[in-house]
Image (cartoon, rainbow, N blue to C red):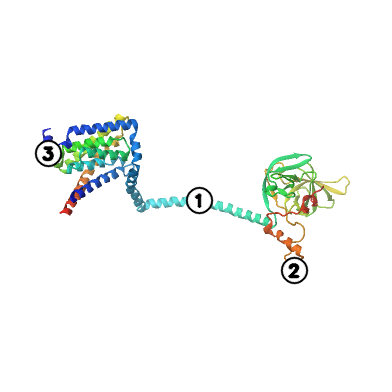
Amino acid sequence: MNRHRAHFVLFLLTLVAACLLQLMPLPDLLLPFRPYWLGLILIYWALEEPERVGLGRAFLLGLVGDVLQGDLLGDQALRLAALAFIVLRFRSRLRFFPMWQQSLAVFALLLNDRVLSLMERAFTGAPIPPMSFWYAPVAGMLAWPWVFLLLDDLRARLRVHEA
Amino acid sequence: MPLARTDTTPLFGVGATSTLRLVVYLAIGVTLMVADYRGHYLARVRQYAAIAVEPVYRIAAMPADAARNIRQAVADRQALTQENQRLREALLLTQARLNRLGAVAEQNTRLKELLDVQHSLGLGVQLAKLIDIVLDPYRQRITLDAGARQGVVVGQAVLDAYGVMGQISEVLPTTSTAVLITDTSHALPVVIERTGLRTIAYGSGSSDRLDVPNIPVSADVKAGDKLLTSGLGGSFPAGFPVGEIVSVAAEPSGMFAVAVARPAAALERSGDVLLLRPLADPVGPPAMTPEVGPPAPPPEQRVVAPPRTPATAAPPPVEPGMLPGTTPGTTP
């Protein structure tokens, strides 16, 4: 029970951190390179503890992100649900990829997410975004190993603590 | 997708990844988006959620604030040097401006001291505006926008920036009328600055001319001599410019010389004029203080003494006996 609670707290904390990172102001030059933190964290939890991340929770997280970022309600919810679905579908394979392949897979996932976003924009009549729109998946791919290692380490420490 | 199907072992729950659920969620998402796009519900939701959202924004902004602070703290030397240089230049410029301002301030102090001197002489000054100029050959008068409510009393001297203009002849509650020195009914005791010769300047009825008759033939008067108030008669304090002699001629009888002067004050132009507070007791020796002098002054003189002190110059206690009609300065 205690173990579950600690892990749940860690889970919540990472989500909150992802929200904050998503909102954190950056210099204009770096802004296009901000990874999609919500997506990255969701991918991690879907890979490692899929019992925590269902489509419903992904959808809810997306709604929270929508409320925070104030774009279109349902925009991130839809994208994160799709992301969670793909990760959960191919979870076993993704899990045992070596790190560089995993990073590439994350890149593909984030790119897919961007394509979905582009489609939504097209439907709402927003103009085609500039080239920098596509930098974020690259940044996400580069950030993935560090996110993965950090969260793995945190979870390992929690487990050691319990033992 | 044979591999994918083998992936979804019962351990991880098939239902969570079923395509149907995905489709349901995607449909909900699309519905939400369409609804929000049409109805802008998100703004309303955000208003309700503001209590929760705003702290999140604050917290999210914290690292950036901290980063900015750190950047300022460890700003590199060159940037600081450049900024220092720039600020130095700005300081120099400001200093130059300040110096100029200092000169003005000094001048201001001097002028204030001058005003204080006037106060100590019992010459309170009041500013008034010209309302209407009635300059006709027979009545050289002006109307001012200050009256009894502003403390104007009959007999006050009216000045402008260049010289004496006239004196108050009539006071209404909020306006007053002044007789110009060029009015035919007006006479002004003057002194010729160069020689100290005392005489009287009469109004001519024309706003650019003063008559100075009855000058002894032997007197040294030339065109260009300046006329000042002599202070005799008490209506006007001594030493204010009155005009300048334009021409001197002999009277037909040959007994006196007659001079014509041009008023120094801009009688036809002045918009703002100064009203001098009349002196409390313009004639006679300075007030005696009770403790000075062996013969003790009579008690009534001691009572009169305080109003004559400089401090009480501003509220002018004017006895009816001091009105211009009784002064030798004005002719009936």
Residue A121 position within the rendered picture, expressed as x and y whole percent measured from the top left:
30, 32
The chain that hosts pointer 1 is: B
Residue B66 position within the rendered picture, expressed as x and y whole percent measured from the top left:
34, 50
Number of the label disc, if any, that sits on residue B231: none
CB-based contact (under 8 Å), mark 1 and mark 3: no
Using the rendered image, report if marks 1 and 3 lie on a common chain.
yes
The chain that hosts pointer 2 is: B
Query: Viewed as shown, does residue A99 lie left or right of B173?
Result: left
How many residues crowd around disc 2 within 10 Å: few (fewer than 14), some, or many (20 or more)? few
Secondary structure state at the residue bearing disc 1? helix
- Relative depth, front residue between B33 and B230: B33
Residue pointed to by mark 2 = B293
Residue B9 position within the rendered picture, expressed as x and y whole percent measured from the top left:
11, 38
Query: Viewed as shown, does residue A135 lie left or right of B332?
Result: left
**Residue drawn at 35 percent across, 37 percent down:** B44
Query: Viewed as shown, does residue B232 lie left or right of A1?
Result: right
